Image (tube, rainbow, N blue to C red):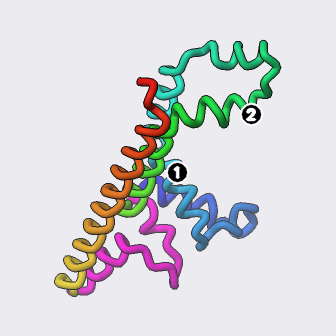
Amino acid sequence: MVLGLAYIFTFNAPGSVLNRLYATLAILVISNLVHYFTVPFLTATTSLKQMDAEFESVAASMGVPFWKTFWRVTVPIALPSIVGISMYFFLNAMVTLSAVVFLVAPGTELAAVAVLLMDDSGDTAQAAAMSVLIVAVGLLVRLVYWLVLRGITRRTQAWR
């Protein structure tokens, strides 16, 4: 809630350069990235710390550019963590209310906010149905995540 209010005061100031972001999808994305940053950061850090530090040294001594080592070694090894981070961001952003309830502009319909508004207006049955749809989409995304992760693990983590 405090994060949403801080975004309103920061982005809604008329003389601010950031005012252009107010009432756009970009502010909702930025808000969710900042709000849920800690867990993905720790996941990525842990994933990178598990890798051998000599990959970069060996690649540099062989004259392989950094970007080639990054795309051919680091990304495939860290791909399960990258997919997990994206799933975490998606599911949490889909059900968040605390900050986005203050940032939603007229004409922008978010499912979690719609549930809140339906319940406030007395449409409890519709709010419950929308909540079930949100849970169903979350379960479907989780199933797709599991299938993708299984395929990625087989292709990139066979060395384990």
Residue highlighted by disc 1:
33
Disc 1 to disc 2, C-alpha distance? 25 Å
Residue highlighted by disc 2:
67
Residue 117 lies within the magenta run: yes
Q: Residue furthest right?
A: 63
Label 2 amino acid?
Trp
Task: Look at 48% across and 28% down and name the residue there.
Answer: 47
Secondary structure of residue under mark 1: helix
Label 1 amino acid?
Leu
Q: At which x and y percent is residue 72? A: 65, 34
Q: Is residue 35 above or below residue 144?
A: above
Task: Look at 30% across and 76% down and name the residue there.
Answer: 115
Pointers 1 and 2 in contact (CB under 8 A)? no
Is 144 or 5 nearer to us in this picture? 144
Q: Report if residue 141 is visible in the image.
A: yes
Q: At which x and y percent is residue 107? A: 51, 84
Label whose residue precedes the other's in the sequence (1 or 2): 1
Q: Report if residue 119 is visible in the image.
A: no
Is 64 or 110 nearer to us in this picture? 64
Residue 118 relative to residue 73: left or right? left
Residue 139 lies within the magenta run: no
Using a 10 Å C-alpha cutoff, classify the residue at mark 2 as few (fewer than 14 neighbours), some (14 to 19) or many (20 or more).
Answer: few
Q: Which of pointers 1 and 2 indicates the residue nearer the eye?
A: 2
Q: At which x and y percent is residue 66? A: 75, 28
Give the residues drawn in magenta, as a range: 98-122
Task: Look at 73% across and 33% down and name the residue there.
Answer: 68
Using a 10 Å C-alpha cutoff, classify the residue at mark 1 as few (fewer than 14 neighbours), some (14 to 19) or many (20 or more).
Answer: some
